[in-house]
Amino acid sequence: MNKDNIILSPAQKALRINLDNDIYGSFVEIGAGQEVARQFFRVGSASTTIAKTMSAYDRDFSNAIYGREDDGRYVSKNRLINMLNHEYSLIEERLRTEDHPNTKFFAFADTVTTIDYQKKKKGHGWIGIRFQKNSNSQPNDFIFHVRLNDQDSKLQQETVGVLGTNLIHACFFNNESAKDILKEIYHNLSRDNVEIDMIEVVGPDFENEDNRLLSMVLVKEGYTDAVTFNTKKENRHPSDILRKKNILTLRGSFRPVTKVNIDMLENGINKFIDDKKVVKDNIQILFEITLSNLRAEGEVDESDFLDRVEILCSLGYTVMISNFKKYYKLIEYLSGFSEKRMGIIIGADNLIEMFEEKYYRNLNGGILEAFGIIFTRDVKIYLYPYIKDNTLLNSTNIPVHPRVKSLYDYMNNNKRIIDINHSKDVLKIFSRQVLKMIKDCKDGEWEHMVPKGVSELIKDKSLFGSSNCQL
């Protein structure tokens, strides 16, 4: 076997770091023991690696050291960053560079909560490192959020120990790219143990890295099911955006976003706001793109992915990339962040597919199992009409197989499916046709089909292959 393909154990990685006299730093861990530092103490020679270990469990002590968080949360990204800021500044203050000319310094931190004994509170946390790639360079930050899936607190603590060891080892021995570091973090672990659902990399050695692409890798590699980007095109943890919100989601290819997408959204919002259980100021709009959609033409095209996110975020929308082929999985996921009334805007053609039994053959309970999840969530479907064979399809006339007609009628009669208005002049606009016109350089034929400002953005930034038209 090629040595490059050999995956070292956590102990072997810790020992390799300990035996390297040019790697030196601090460990601060809150909430899951000191499992990462323990990996390094246990293998020996830790004195050449560890400057300090600490665990400030008491909240008053923690606040005295790292400051009080505005939101009062201790397992948060802000707390992790404050930990890294404080601990790395102490390294710079107390260890003179001239005394350690070849040393690469680091500060490792984690703030974690593990599963409770009743197994109602799930384990999760923030893990990160500030490190020098070279002894004379400015430091970089590599941070991420994890969901701990082991059903035992001790196992979750051990998982954190492996994660931290993998991270430190990768940052010093496998650091050609942020993707390389990310892939090593999962060594000796699986999705059954841990899910990484948010990542951020900053620093001089990663100036060319795009955090949005790293987030896409999380979904593509199966490390998580969904990632989100805010209107500033920044990675954000889903809970920061969706927690306790009235979530209104629109799924599509958005390749590019067209006037019909905006018409769906605007008419969906109007109906959503009319709902007595929806608070207007608490609405979170979400544009969702599935990974299967990104793979529609084969392997994921990174530039194509960025083009879609670029336009949607520039229009002021929050974007989610997900692994959810089925709507019931999306609904189940979103309801994990909010118990408040949610809405899904769906075209009539997609609703027809939603009621086809073949899509649920992987479930033991078939379509009934999927809709059981939907029925137990506080969600409504806002139905946008679709023209087929010159017939306008809506909730009153969509073709549903007789075997599931009673299921459809139950949802419709209980006002789980609500028809929304539409603009006749945009109903026949399709993204795939607009995209073809862009690639065929048919300027003047597609610009009126996209929202205001989008055509200029596509041309100015040469999105979706439009650069070929300027040659």
Image (cartoon, helix red, strand yellow):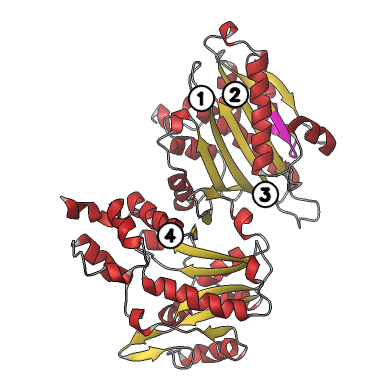
Question: Image point 56% across, 47% down: which residue?
Answer: 198
Which is closer to the viewer, label 3 or label 1?
1
Instruction: Decide which of tag 1 and tag 4 comes sooner along the chain.
Output: 1
In the displayed structure image, the side of residue 450 where residue 445 appears, left or right: left
The three-letter amino acid code for the residue at tag 3 is Asp
Q: CA distance from mark 4 to mark 2?
A: 37 Å
Q: Residue furthest top?
A: 99
Q: Which residue is mark 1?
A: 172
Secondary structure state at the residue bearing disc 4: helix
Secondary structure state at the residue bearing disc 2: strand
Which is closer to the viewer, label 3 or label 4?
4
Instruction: Decide which of tag 3 and tag 1 comes sooner along the chain.
Output: 3
Residue 115 appears in view: yes
Verify CB contact (< 8 Å) between mark 2 and mark 1. yes
| 412 vs 93, nearest the viewer | 93
Q: Position of residue 343 (x, y in %)?
A: 57, 74
Verify CB contact (< 8 Å) between mark 3 and mark 1. no
Q: Quadrant of residue 356?
A: bottom left
Question: Image point 37% across, 72% down: which residue?
Answer: 259
Quadrant housing the N terminus: top left
> Which segment is the magenta one?
28-39
Q: Which residue is mark 4?
A: 312
Q: Position of residue 44 (x, y in %)?
A: 66, 18
Which is closer to the viewer, label 2 or label 1?
2
| 104 vs 454, nearest the viewer | 454
The three-letter amino acid code for the residue at tag 1 is Phe
Instruction: Decide which of tag 2 and tag 1 comes sooner along the chain.
Output: 2
The three-letter amino acid code for the residue at tag 2 is Phe
Q: Which residue is mark 2?
A: 106
Q: Which residue is mark 3?
A: 150
